[in-house]
Image (spheres, rainbow, N blue to C red):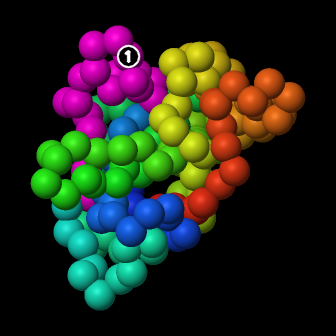
Amino acid sequence: VGLLVATDGALRLPRGLPAAALVTSSPPGAFYQDHPVVDDMKVTLEYDLGAPLASPRWLDGYQAFRGLQYHPGLAIIVDVRLMVPGAGTCSPVGWSALPVFEREGAYVAGGMYQLPLFNGVPSRSILKDMANERDVDAVIVRYLQASDADADGCCGRPSTAGAE
């Protein structure tokens, strides 16, 4: 399966630092394992310099994901990071997951989406659960409900990111 994804921007990011989006697929979610693999990672590199730092706009357009296999729990993970100038490092702001396929089967869920950003980075356990279940959204809701009770840091209150 081939897929085109455009990550267009984010809204209400904290701190006045430049931001970038890391975009990958899960499964496999290889970037979030003990030994991160970046082979399938896409990164926003073109910025609208007129956009406020708290609401960056990325001009990269569509980025291609090739060779994806049908999997009911396949999702595109958007991971927004703040770039720390002069330090050569980045700081995670939040992440989101966009299910690739419709719940009814192997039909791509095409469209334009505004996604919530959850604090931090996705845990290996949430990526594993999304891969094992057909309904990515239900997994995220379950983790949100658990984080409200446990405050385990899996998911936080959202900002937003745009993708199509």
Estimate the x, y position of residue 137 in percent, counting from the top left. Answer: 71, 40
What x and y, as percent, mark residue 20? Answer: 31, 57
Q: Is residue 148 left or right of residue 104?
A: right
Magenta: predominant secondary structure element? loop
**Pick the front one: 86 or 42:** 86
Image quadrant in which you'd find residue 114: bottom right
- Single out the residue that lies furthest toward the top: 34
Q: Residue at x 39, y 24 (%)?
A: 32
Does residue 6 lie above or below 102 as drawn? below
Instruction: Please state which amino acid type lies under the numbered disc 1.
Output: Gln
Query: Is 90 colored magenta in this rendering?
Result: no
Q: Give the vertical position of 154 relative to 102 (above or below).
A: above
Quarter assignment of residue 63: bottom left
Q: Which residues are magenta?
A: 26-44
- The residue at which mark 1 appears reads as 33
Q: Is residue 30 visible?
A: yes
Eyeballing the image, is 21 above or below 69? below
Q: Residue furthest bottom?
A: 50
Residue at x-position 70% and y-position 35%: 140
Nearest the viewer among 26 and 143 is 143
